[in-house]
């Protein structure tokens, strides 16, 4: 991932076809180690391709990846008598959150905004 980030930084900086040395310089500037094999693999994969097209195709692939939603389905009330017992528990949690802790005078009467 750091090699991809270094490549994107180089492209954003105006170097449309960064070399392995360019990526090593970027990674070295932040103290990260450069893995020559990964750099060469990335450069061989993106050689001759437009970075905006690669980003767009990657975004399309990520759109098909399922994300979230699992916890919501597990928290849904069941049919039958289970729904009635879940409501009071939710109300009790809300009431607990509403109660605020009283401010103490540990600062001896001084406040940051006085």
Image: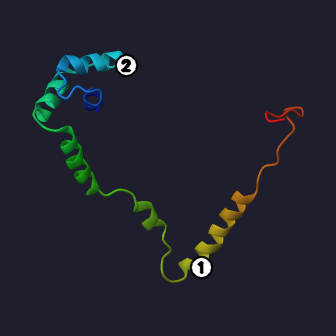
Q: Pick whichever, 70 or 112, lies toward us.
A: 112
Q: Which residue is mark 1?
A: 84
Report whether 4 appears left or right of 94. Answer: left
Q: Pick whichever, 4 or 94, lies toward us.
A: 4
Q: Pick whichever, 61 or 71, lies toward us.
A: 61
Q: Is residue 29 above or below residue 83?
A: above
Image location (x, y in percent) of residue 9: 30, 28
Residue at image location 80% in from the left, 36% down from the top: 113
Image location (x, y in percent) of residue 107: 84, 32
Q: Residue 31, labelled with which disc?
A: none
Report whether 15 appears left or right of 95. Answer: left
Image location (x, y in percent) of residue 88: 65, 72
Report whether 45 appears left or right of 25. Answer: left
Q: Is residue 12 above or below residue 103?
A: above
Q: Residue 30, labelled with which disc?
A: 2
**Residue 82 quadrant:** bottom right
1 or 2: tag closer to the N-terminus: 2
């Amino acid at each position: 991932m750091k090699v991809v980030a270094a490549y994107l930084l180089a492209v954003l900086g105006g170097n449309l076809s960064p070399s392995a040395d360019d990526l090593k310089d970027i990674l070295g500037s932040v103290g990260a180690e450069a893995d020559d094999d990964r750099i060469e693999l990335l450069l061989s994969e993106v050689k001759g391709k437009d970075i905006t097209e690669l980003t767009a195709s990657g975004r399309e692939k990520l759109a098909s990846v399922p994300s979230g939603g699992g916890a919501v389905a597990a928290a849904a009330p069941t049919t039958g008598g289970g729904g009635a017992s879940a409501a009071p528990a939710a109300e009790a949690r809300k009431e607990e959150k509403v109660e605020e802790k009283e401010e103490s005078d540990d600062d001896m009467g001084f406040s940051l905004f006085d």
